[in-house]
Image (spheres, rainbow, N blue to C red):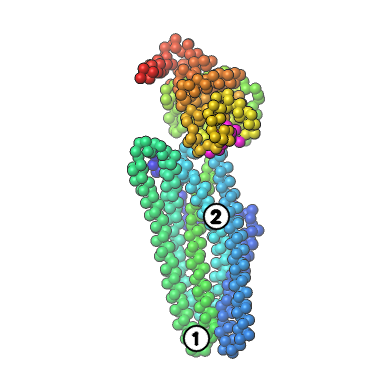
Amino acid sequence: MLMAEQYEEDEISGRAYDARLMKRLLRFGKPYTLQLLAGVLLLLGLSGLELIGPILTKEAVDKYIPAKDLPGLLRILILYGLVLVGLFAGRFLQIYITNWVGQKIMLDIRSQIFDKLARLSISYFDRNPVGRIMTRISSDVEVINQMFTQGVVAIFGDVFILVGIIVAMLVLNWKLALVTFVVLPFLFWVAFLFKVKVRDAFREMRRRLAKVNAYLQENIVGMRIVQLFRREKLNLEQFQDLNRGLMESHLKTVLYFSLFYPTVELLSSVAIALILWSGGGMILKDALTLGALIAFLQYAERFYMPVRDLAEKYNILQSSMASSERLFELLDEEIAVKDPAAPQKLTMPLDSVEFRNVSFAYAGREWVLKNVSFRVESGETVAIVGYTGAGKTTLINLLSRFYDVQEGQILVNGRDIREIAQCDLRRLMAIVQQDVFIFARTVEENIRLGSAISGERVMAAAQAVSADRFIEKLPGGYDEKLEERGATLSAGERQLLSFARALVHDPPILILDEATSSVDTETEQLIQKAIARLLEGRTAIVIAHRLSTIQRADRIIVLHDGQVRETGTHQELLRQRGLYYRLYQLQSENHAVSKSA
């Protein structure tokens, strides 16, 4: 099993707050400007209501209680109750609106990510494990949701409250207000240290979470191999190392918050003590009323609540910065295989498929194919054989434009496939691979793959490849829902489904990539009969491991070390006594040994 560290790292660097990233994030909220504005206005109103409570308290203590004015005190209580009702209604609307916006933005971001993933070249998925990608589309998007629901909009409310409290305190008693603000320089210094440390911690935590998810996905998909080769204990130890790293990075963030919050509480307590000392002295000198002191204490408590909240909001912003960097890295990923600016239309019917002096390397200059040239005429069946690693499957990857050639050309009807839109090119072909992917959908949906194909055509295709024999035995028949990756089907049954899937789309080009290697002899015979009947008038490229399956091909191309070494019919190649002859002899000997065994 591969360790998650073996994949390329997506280390992120940047400032603790990146205005460029924030600007891009806020673009996601642009379609919901009115709702966000409503949330901000509600917070502005809530901030104003928060300031009324201490004023009402001051009035009650200084005016109505000393005068024993019960009706006046009752009016104060009623006003206070109305303020509480207003706070309740305002907070409900504000929370609902911002969370509604957050969910809409999550929907948009995930849709954009999925769209980008669907258009990215296969080389991207070669470099990035599924677990890491899943972290982007799930955990990182959820962090962005928190930024919009609990971060950006809520920060406005906290700022409004802070400004309002500062103004109210200065109006109430500017001398006592200045005493309260003595601790602010220390608070700003603590907040600065906090923000410098916390983002690096969050960045490290997201990176380690991606590693854990990647390793989990890898082991879950490969669980059969894990158990067959008794790697449970070893893989557990490796997972524990990754999991321990995630825990340690998380605990580092916990440490910073554990230090920050008590520090803010200590500074707020110091401020309260200073207010009591200075305010008490003023009361003794008749320079301040008791109600004003109580109001000041309430304002001081409210002053440090948004300060503590701002720390939490800053936490969300830090996390969202790290997550947004990763999301934008994915969204900005260069698409290696692009459609041309002005795609050319192919003229039908299909005339030919040609590889002209094609050379290709997956990495660097380690050539997998070297100056490969051959032509497949319309209606011709060409088989490609060779030892493992000769470059057979690479030919199909290039013809499908999963990758682009570095040298040479691939032509369809004489036109370079790089001049054709990828969807138009792939519409011409159907590929049956050795490793068949089955979706967790019904049998019929796995054959149609979302195309507007009638049930009758689906059944006809299944019958043509003899897949109907096992489908009709399923409890639900064609409506039977299959397990993920076809776990309840045999390898042969999955292969037959893939044949039906290819044939129902009736492509001009049929590509079989080791399509019968996982099928038993009886099933292979059924498939060979179906192929012989259905290939009439169709252009076919067959990559074969079993040479017995391609003896009737119009032409056989022998690849060796990325180069075309031999070309001819089965009998012509046997008479040459070259590579094909040795391959055929080797398989014949192995077949004889297996039969005698």
Q: CA distance from mark 1 to mark 2?
A: 48 Å
Q: Nearer the viewer, mark 1 or mark 2?
A: 2
Amino acid at circle 2: Asn
Which residue is labeled 1 in the image?
A: 282
Q: Which residues are magenta?
A: 440-450
Answer whether residue 505 is visible to the viewer in this image. Answer: no
Q: Secondary structure at mark 2?
A: helix
Residue 426, compared with residue 133, is above or below; it is above
In this rendered view, identify the residue nearer to me: 266 or 589.
Answer: 589
Q: Position of residue 233 (x, y in %)?
A: 33, 43
In this rendered view, identify the residue nearer to me: 388 or 421.
Answer: 388
Q: Secondary structure at mark 1?
A: helix
Q: Position of residue 345 (x, y in %)?
A: 65, 29
Amino acid at circle 1: Met
Residue 402, compared with residue 205, is above or below; it is above
Disc 2: CA contacts within 10 A as few (<14), some (14-19) or many (>=20): many
In this rendered view, identify the residue nearer to me: 476 or 516.
Answer: 476
In this rendered view, identify the residue nearer to me: 424 or 505.
Answer: 505
Q: Quadrant of the C terminus?
A: top left
Disc 1: CA contacts within 10 A as few (<14), some (14-19) or many (>=20): some
* Residue 499 magenta: no
**Marks 1 and 2, the one that precedes in the sequence:** 2
Q: Quadrant of residue 427?
A: top right
**Which residue is at 58% across, 83% downward?**
60
**Which residue is at 47% across, 71% downward?**
184
Determine which of the numbered discs, if any, sits on residue 44 in the image: none
Q: Position of residue 46 (x, y in %)?
A: 60, 69
Which residue is labeled 2 in the image?
A: 145
**Which residue is at 48% across, 47% downward?**
135
* Residue 443 magenta: yes
